[in-house]
Image (spheres, rainbow, N blue to C red):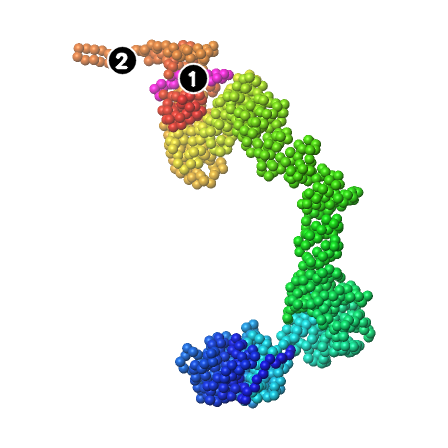
């Protein structure tokens, strides 16, 4: 650090205080009873200000720059504007000692010998507070909350903005050590407010706001008169009786002298936000200095050490940007760094540090040695085991213990010294002298080696990585490069202030100067770019640059030198430069140039760097071909040109190498058909056709399909033309192609037909199939498009396609619920088994989905299918068994639908009697296995509830008992448990009204019949209504042997008249009266209905004896009393006689199910069909 005097002036009076305007442009001095205003730039006195009548002791400027205040021995305070006009004056009872503006509120504190006052523009009066001792100095904290007062009795009083004392600090010396100057640290970075205190006990001390002292008192050895901080609080100025201003760190470490004076220094201040210092003295001298802080630093490769805050050393890793701070707490004079060593020279000693580890990124240093000795030197260098001191013309080598081992005396002043490496203890030094000599010195050798001597003084030196070349910057700013071995000057460049060789490349160096960075490779011209500062290192693509006080690593692409090598086809050297750091574009350019130069090894490395797999595959294929013996470089270069897009050059090379076909392939692959035609000329027609085909392919790929179709047709590629037309739905174009094609071209025509079919043009498809003669496909077309009439017509002409037509037709009908038609279609196709399987699947699905009505219908359909198939004698027995089984299942599911609806749905629309009859019917029918989907629990539950409701308590109890042995769903568990309990309270018998009557033998049957749905007496099966499931008043009878169905029907239709039986009542008439007389002699057994006589036949045993009638009985029957189930063969017809002719019964002519006529009519109105077989009411067929 050194102080340079900028300007000086002298007045007659002592200068007690001074203040800078906050912007630094003006300086206000208290001189005698006047204020002097100076221009800080050149020391011009702008204006003297008169207003006080006695000596002015103090002056202070407000932080906002609008006003300043002065205090005098005349006990008054004057407020001045920035325009140098006095605007306000107020007084104290004693002479004014100090004034200070609050930096935030601009409140003014004015202190006298006996009190202090606080004034602000908003207040009309000044609030004053008494003081127990003379106040000598004052200072506000940064936030303006507290005011510190220094007193002559050694006390520091810290007050708030209202003047109330908050902290009192009593110095040990008391009144023997009066406080003469105090100042708060203005730094915003400090966590605590720190007060610097200078007293006439010749001590410098620091305190926190709380009153706690920071560290120990620092002895000054003079009486301090003034203390002030730099703007950012990093340094302190102290002046006093030693007639000089001393510079201290913020921690109180003395750094040096700013300027020696001829009398006491009463005041000193730092110009805001600068390194300028003004000093005011007892003899009236005003001195304005500029402080210049020299850069103390050291560099080795990527480690840079520099001084910070004058007492700290920061070591920066230029690559990783890591930093470490070493606090020395003394002025750092010199720094040297080498490998893992760091040397720091302090005023009284040298510290040698070493790294904790050998890790290149380690930044932890520890003290290795201390040399406690004062040294005077110009330059300091550290090696592995030594330090080197440079003193003018002399070099001294000291061990780390401080012992001088050797010394070298030079002929001239040493201007530059640098460690250039070597084994530990034998390192080499590169030394440049003022007389132009450049020497190499080894620390273990007394003799210096003169490398060369030049005419001009040395400013900067560097040696190349291989130690073959030396770069020198001389005093004329010229960079000179020498060959060390031959001493030959290789080249020189102007405008250089520093130079550095690239540590990773022998032929590259950089030098800086004139605001430019210059990079030179080999003997090529210099490449320039703007850069401020000094180049101090060059590693790969990073240039280490020192600008003012900061060191930075600048990433500089090595593009320019790389291109210089490329221009000379020096591919390997260019690759070495690229490895130092170039952009991806530069790498690609290097790769391309090397590839064109057929330098495949370099090209491969460069393409690998940019990850271009396409070119790497090309290089790999060329290398493989070279291994196989190919050596035609023209062919290799043609491949390279084609990859690069230089197609015409590639074509010429292909032609020159005799590979015209490759050129043609290249043009066609690139769809450059015009060029291909030009290249081909009037060549082979086959080639021309191939070219047209490829052009069509291209037109197709670029979404020009119509052009492609035309080209394909002209090239004879009908298949591709058809494919494009079909995929775009161009039916017109397809039919044109199909009609132009010969019928022998089967494949293209079939493709046309497929597209017609796909595009919903079946007429064109049929035309095409007929042209080809593919009748099977035509049949399939009719089937797929559901054009059944055309299909049937074709089937009539060609019976061999019968199966292909009727089977899909039947399946289509079945899918559309047209089962009767489907049955006929299957029958026509001879596929009865297929029909059965379809219906079985439909039935199973209906059961699984709980559609029991549908299941009943499908089972009925199945039974009729089986009956139809039973006409085949081979299948008769099996199919009849299936018929009866499916009929039975249809009846069960038809009835169970009502039970399921009752138990699963919240509301029931069925009468209790119907539910009772159905559940009783199901219970008697389910004596063996229960069919899929039918729940015995639901059936018994329904029976139990309806039995109980209708008074059949015994049957209800039986149902509940049966339920106890079954697994009950949770939803009806409670209902069943409750019903089981409550039924116990009912009588153990059934209502007689519910007991079914056998219409053959007139026997009352129990509700719970072990024999099932037959009479317990005559074993006659009951006939049930298919809606209410009541027992109908029908009795089945059979024909006597020898009577055919047709004869029986004819006899019944005769309806022979019966003899009327004479009445037992006879009418007797007299003159005045009429009487009825009962004739008891007539035979009461004279009933002449032969069928009734057949019914009264007594049963001989447990076997069922059917009612068999002869011709006379048939003749006696009325047609309206007989119902006939006219089953198709091989089944026999069934005959039933109604015993209550007045109660009408209706039988469905399709399914032969019996209903009460009223019920049937209602159901038909509701469903428009038979509820059982779904026969439409408008269908007249059976």
Q: Is residue 230 magenta?
A: no
**What distance separates the C-alpha of mark 1 from that of mark 2?**
38 Å
Closer mark to the observer between disc 1 and disc 2: 1
Question: For residue 1124, which numbered disc appears in the image?
Answer: 1
Question: For residue 1065, which numbered disc appears in the image?
Answer: 2
Element type at marker 1?
A: strand
Quadrant containing the C terminus is: top left
Q: Position of residue 8 (x, y in %)?
A: 58, 83
Question: For residue 646, which numbered disc appears in the image?
Answer: none
Q: Is residue 576 visible?
A: yes
Give the extent of the magenta segment: 1121-1143
User: Which residue is drawn at the image coordinates 35% and 10% (left, top)?
Assistant: 1057
Horizontal arrangement in the rendering, residue 395 relative to residue 951 (left or right)? right
- Position of 1029 relative to 409 (above/below): above
**How many numbered dots are placed on residues in this image?**
2
- Position of 684 relative to 437 (above/below): above
Question: 696 and 1073: which one is in front?
Answer: 696
Q: Position of residue 679 (x, y in %)?
A: 69, 38
Which one is earlier in the sequence, the residue at label 1 or at label 2?
A: 2
Q: Is residue 1142 magenta?
A: yes
């Amino acid at each position: 650090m050194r102080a340079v005097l900028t300007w000086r002036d002298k007045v007659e009076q002592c200068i007690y205080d001074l203040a800078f305007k906050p912007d630094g442009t003006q300086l206000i001095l208290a001189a005698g009873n006047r204020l002097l205003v100076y221009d800080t730039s050149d020391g011009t006195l702008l204006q003297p200000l008169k207003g006080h009548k006695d000596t002015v002791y103090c002056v202070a400027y407000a932080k906002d720059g609008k006003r300043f205040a002065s205090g005098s021995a005349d006990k008054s305070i004057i407020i001045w504007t920035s325009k140098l006009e006095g605007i306000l004056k107020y007084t104290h009872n004693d002479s004014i000692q100090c004034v200070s503006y609050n930096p935030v509120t601009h409140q003014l504190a004015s202190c006298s010998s006996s009190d202090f006052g606080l004034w602000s523009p908003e207040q009309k009066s000044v609030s004053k507070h008494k003081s127990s001792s003379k106040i000598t100095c004052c200072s506000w904290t940064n936030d303006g909350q507290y005011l510190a007062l220094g007193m002559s009795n050694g006390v520091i009083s810290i007050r708030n903005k209202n003047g109330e004392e908050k902290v009192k600090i009593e110095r040990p010396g008391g009144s023997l050590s009066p406080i003469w100057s105090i100042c708060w640290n203005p730094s915003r970075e400090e966590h605590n407010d720190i007060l610097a205190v200078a007293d006439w006990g010749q001590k410098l001390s620091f305190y926190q706001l709380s009153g706690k002292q920071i560290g120990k008192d620092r002895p000054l050895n003079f009486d301090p008169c003034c203390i002030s901080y730099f703007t950012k609080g990093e340094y302190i100025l102290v002046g006093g009786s030693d007639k000089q201003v001393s510079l201290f760190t913020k921690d109180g470490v003395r750094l040096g002298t700013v300027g020696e004076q001829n009398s006491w220094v009463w005041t000193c201040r730092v110009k805001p936000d600068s390194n300028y210092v003004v000093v005011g003295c007892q003899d009236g001298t005003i001195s304005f200095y500029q402080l210049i802080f020299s850069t103390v630093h050291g560099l080795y490769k990527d480690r840079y050490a520099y001084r910070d805050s004058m007492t700290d050393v920061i070591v920066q890793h230029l690559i990783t940007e890591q930093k470490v701070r070493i606090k020395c707490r003394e002025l750092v004079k010199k720094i040297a760094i080498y490998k893992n060593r760091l040397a720091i020279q302090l005023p009284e000693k040298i510290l040698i540090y070493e790294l904790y580890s050998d890790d290149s990124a380690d930044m932890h240093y520890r003290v290795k040695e201390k040399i406690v000795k004062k040294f005077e030197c110009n330059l300091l260098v550290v090696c592995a085991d030594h330090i080197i001191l440079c003193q003018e013309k002399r070099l001294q080598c000291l061990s780390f213990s401080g012992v001088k081992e050797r010394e070298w005396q030079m002929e001239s002043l040493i201007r530059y010294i640098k460690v250039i490496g070597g084994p530990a203890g034998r390192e080499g030094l590169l030394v440049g002298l003022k007389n132009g000599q450049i020497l190499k010195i080894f620390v273990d050798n007394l003799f210096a080696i003169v490398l060369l001597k030049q005419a001009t003084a040395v400013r900067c030196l560097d040696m190349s990585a291989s130690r073959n070349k030396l770069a020198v910057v001389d005093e004329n700013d010229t960079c000179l490069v020498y060959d060390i071995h031959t001493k030959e000057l290789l080249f020189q460049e102007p405008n250089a202030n520093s130079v550095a060789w690239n540590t990773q490349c022998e032929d590259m160096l950089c030098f800086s100067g004139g605001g430019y960075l210059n990079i030179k490779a080999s003997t090529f011209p210099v490449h320039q770019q703007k850069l401020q500062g000094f180049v101090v290192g060059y590693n790969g693509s990073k240039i280490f640059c020192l600008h003012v006080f900061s060191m930075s690593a600048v990433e500089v692409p090595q593009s320019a030198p790389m291109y210089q090598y490329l221009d000379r086809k020096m591919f390997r050297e260019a690759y070495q430069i690229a490895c130092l750091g170039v952009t991806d574009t530069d790498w690609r350019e290097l790769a391309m140039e090397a590839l064109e130069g057929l330098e495949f090894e370099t090209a491969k490395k460069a393409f690998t760097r940019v990850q271009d797999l396409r070119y790497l595959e090309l290089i790999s294929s060329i290398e493989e071909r070279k291994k196989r013996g190919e050596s035609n470089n023209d062919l290799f270069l043609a491949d390279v040109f084609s990859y690069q897009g230089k197609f015409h050059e590639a074509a010429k090379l292909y032609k020159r190498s005799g590979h015209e076909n490759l050129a043609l392939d290249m043009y066609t692959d690139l769809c450059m058909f015009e060029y291909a035609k030009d290249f081909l000329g009037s060549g082979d027609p086959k080639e021309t056709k191939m070219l047209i085909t490829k052009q069509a392919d291209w037109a197709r790929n670029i979404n020009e399909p119509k052009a492609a179709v035309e080209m394909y047709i002209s090239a004879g590629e009908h298949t591709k033309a058809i494919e494009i037309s079909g995929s775009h739905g161009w039916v017109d174009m397809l039919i044109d192609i199909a009609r132009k094609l010969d019928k022998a071209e089967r494949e293209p025509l079939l493709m046309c037909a497929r597209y017609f079919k796909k595009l919903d043009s079946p007429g064109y498809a049929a035309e095409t199939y007929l042209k080809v003669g593919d009748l099977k496909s035509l049949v399939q077309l009719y089937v797929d498009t559901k054009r059944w009439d055309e299909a049937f017509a074709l089937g009539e002409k060609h019976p061999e396609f019968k199966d292909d037509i009727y089977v899909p037709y039947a399946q289509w009908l079945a899918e559309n619920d047209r089962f009767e038609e489907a049955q006929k279609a299957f029958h026509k196709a001879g596929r009865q088994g297929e029909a059965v399987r379809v219906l079985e699947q439909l039935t199973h699905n209906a059961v699984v989905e709980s559609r029991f009505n549908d299941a009943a219908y499908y089972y009925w359909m199945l039974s009729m299918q089986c009956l139809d198939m039973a006409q085949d004698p081979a299948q008769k027995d099996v199919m009849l068994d299936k018929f009866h089984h499916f009929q039975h299942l249809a009846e069960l599911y038809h009835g169970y639908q009502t039970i399921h609806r009752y138990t699963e749905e919240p509301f029931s629309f069925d009468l209790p009697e119907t539910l009772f009859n159905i559940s009783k019917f199901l219970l008697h029918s389910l004596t063996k296995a229960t069919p899929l989907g039918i729940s015995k629990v639901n059936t018994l539950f329904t029976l139990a509830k309806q039995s109980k409701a209708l008074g059949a308590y015994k049957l209800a109890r039986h149902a509940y008992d049966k339920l106890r042995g079954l697994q009950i769903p949770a939803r009806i568990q409670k209902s069943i448990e409750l019903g089981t309990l409550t039924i116990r309270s009912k009588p153990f018998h059934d209502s007689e009204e519910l007991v079914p009557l056998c219409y053959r033998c007139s026997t009352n049957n129990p509700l719970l019949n072990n024999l099932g749905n037959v009479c317990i007496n005559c074993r006659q099966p009951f006939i049930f209504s298919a809606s209410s499931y009541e027992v109908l008043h029908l009795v089945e009878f059979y024909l006597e042997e020898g009577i055919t169905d047709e004869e029986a029907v004819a006899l019944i239709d005769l309806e022979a008249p019966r003899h009327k039986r004479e009445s037992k009542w006879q009418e007797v008439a007299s003159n005045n009266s009429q009487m009825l007389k009962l004739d008891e002699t007539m035979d009461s057994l004279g009933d002449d209905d032969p069928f009734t006589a057949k019914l009264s036949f007594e049963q001989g045993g447990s076997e069922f004896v059917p009612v068999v009638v002869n011709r006379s009985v048939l003749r006696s029957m009325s047609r309206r009393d007989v119902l006939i189930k006219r089953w198709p063969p091989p089944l026999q017809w069934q005959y039933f006689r109604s015993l209550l002719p007045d109660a009408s019964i209706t039988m469905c002519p399709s399914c032969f199910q019996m209903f009460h006529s009223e019920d049937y009519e209602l159901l038909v109105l509701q469903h428009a069909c038979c509820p059982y077989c779904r026969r439409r009411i408008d269908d007249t067929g059976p």
